[in-house]
C-alpha cells in the first residue's frame, strides 16, 4: 500500500508521503495509557458539563426570573450614583462604579448593565428552589427525550428495559428464562432514573434550608453538597425497597417510574437473553450463603 492512499487519499489526491501511515505499532502500555487519559478526559468534561447545565444554568435562570417577575429586589439605577437595589423595606447596593449617561454608553456596556441587574443574588426560598428544580428537570427531560430520538441510544434504552425485566424475574424467584422475563414490567422503582428524580426532589428541600445571600455561595454549596444529596437520595431509594407498600415511598419514586417510559423501551428476545446472561454472571460474584454467614461473624 502506498503511503498517503489511506483515509485521506480523497483529500490529498493520493499524493504519496503527505499523510504517511504509521509504521510502528504502539505498545500495550502506551495504548492503555491513552485509553486511561481518554477516559479521564471524558469524565472531567462530563462533570464540567453537568455542573454548568444542571447547577449553574438553573440557578442563574431562576435568579433572573425572580428579579424579572418582581418577586425579588430589582435594581434601580440612579444617575451618577451607580446601581442600587430596592426591596421596599431597605436598599442594598450593587457593586457598580458610577456610569456615564445611558446615551453616551456603547451598546455592549448598556447590555452588560442590564444583564448585571439580573445577577443580583436572590435569597433562595422554597419557591425559588422549586422553580430551580423544575428548570433542572426540564433540562434533564429535554436531554433524555433528545437522546431517545437517536437510533443507537434507543437500542441502549431497549437493553435498559431488558435489564429491568430480568431483575423483576429474579426478584420474584422465577427461573431466568426469556419466557418468564418477557411479561415483566420494564419500569423499576429502584432504577437509576428514579434515583436522579429523588436527587432533584431532595435538593429542592435541602437548599431551601441551606441558603445564602450570595449567588456564588449558593452555587458553591450546591456543588459541595452533591455527595450529601446523593447519599440521602440513595438511602431513600434503599428504604423504598423495604417499604414498597408505603405511600411516601411510592409517591417519591413514582416520578422516576413515569420517566422510565422514556429511558426504557420494549426489548426483543435476543436482548432479554443478553440481560439474563449478564445477571447470571453478576450473581456469580455474590457471596454464597455460607460465606455471607462467615462475613457477619467476622
Image: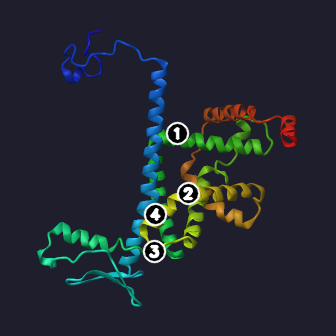
Q: Is residue 62 left or right of residue 184?
A: left
In percent of width and height, residue 114 lies at 26, 73
Taking depth in this image into account, of 143 and 166 the one nearest to the observer is 143
Q: How far apart are the alpha carbons under marks 2 and 4?
A: 11 Å
Q: How far apart are the alpha carbons under marks 3 and 1?
A: 46 Å
Dot 1 falls on a residue whose secondary structure is helix
Q: How far apart are the alpha carbons under marks 2 and 1?
A: 30 Å
Please give the residue where the numbered disc 1 appears in the rendered image: 155
Dot 4 falls on a residue whose secondary structure is helix
Q: Name which residue lies at 42% across and 56% down.
A: 52
Q: Give the answer, above or below, for where 161 lies relative to 249.
A: above
Please give the residue where the numbered disc 4 appears in the rendered image: 219
Taking depth in this image into account, of 252 and 295 the one nearest to the observer is 295
Q: Give the answer, above or below, for where 120 lies relative to 221.
A: below
In percent of width and height, residue 91 lies at 37, 86
Please give the residue where the numbered disc 3 appears in the rendered image: 213
Dot 3 falls on a residue whose secondary structure is loop
Other residues around mark 3 within 10 Å, as few (<14) / some (14–19) / many (≥20): few
Taking depth in this image into account, of 205 and 151 the one nearest to the observer is 205
Where on the picture, by quarter, is residue 118? bottom left
Residue 226, disc? 2
Q: Of tags 3 and 1, which is closer to the observer? A: 3
In percent of width and height, residue 20 lies at 27, 16
Is residue 149 shown to the viewer in this render?
Answer: no
Amino acid at each position: 500500500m502506498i503511503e498517503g492512499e489511506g483515509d485521506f487519499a480523497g483529500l490529498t489526491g493520493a499524493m504519496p508521503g503527505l499523510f504517511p501511515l504509521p509504521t510502528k505499532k504502539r505498545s500495550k502500555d502506551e495504548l492503555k495509557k491513552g485509553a486511561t487519559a481518554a477516559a479521564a478526559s471524558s469524565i472531567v468534561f462530563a462533570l464540567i458539563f453537568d455542573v454548568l447545565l444542571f447547577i449553574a444554568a438553573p440557578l442563574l435562570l431562576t435568579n433572573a426570573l425572580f428579579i424579572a417577575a418582581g418577586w425579588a429586589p430589582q435594581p434601580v439605577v440612579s444617575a451618577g450614583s451607580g446601581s442600587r437595589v430596592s426591596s421596599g423595606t431597605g436598599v442594598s447596593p450593587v457593586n457598580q462604579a458610577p456610569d456615564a449617561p445611558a446615551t453616551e454608553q456603547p451598546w455592549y456596556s448598556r447590555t452588560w448593565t442590564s444583564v448585571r441587574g439580573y445577577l443580583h443574588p436572590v435569597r433562595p426560598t422554597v419557591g425559588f428552589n422549586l422553580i430551580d428544580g423544575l428548570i433542572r428537570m426540564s433540562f434533564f427531560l429535554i436531554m433524555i427525550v433528545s437522546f431517545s430520538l437517536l437510533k443507537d441510544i434507543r437500542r441502549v434504552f431497549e437493553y435498559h428495559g431488558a435489564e429491568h425485566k430480568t431483575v423483576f424475574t429474579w426478584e420474584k424467584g422465577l427461573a431466568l428464562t426469556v419466557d418468564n422475563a418477557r411479561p415483566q414490567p420494564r419500569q423499576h422503582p429502584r432504577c437509576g432514573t428514579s434515583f436522579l428524580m429523588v436527587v432533584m426532589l431532595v435538593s429542592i428541600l435541602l437548599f431551601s434550608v441551606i441558603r445564602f445571600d450570595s449567588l456564588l455561595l449558593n452555587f458553591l454549596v450546591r456543588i459541595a453538597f452533591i455527595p450529601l444529596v446523593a447519599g440521602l437520595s440513595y438511602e431513600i431509594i434503599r428504604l423504598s425497597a423495604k417499604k414498597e407498600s408505603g405511600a411516601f415511598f411510592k409517591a417519591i419514586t413514582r416520578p422516576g417510574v413515569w420517566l422510565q417510559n422514556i429511558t426504557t423501551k420494549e426489548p426483543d428476545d435476543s436482548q432479554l437473553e443478553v440481560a439474563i446472561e449478564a445477571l447470571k454472571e453478576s450473581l456469580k460474584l455474590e457471596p454464597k450463603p455460607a460465606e455471607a454467614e462467615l462475613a457477619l461473624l467476622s
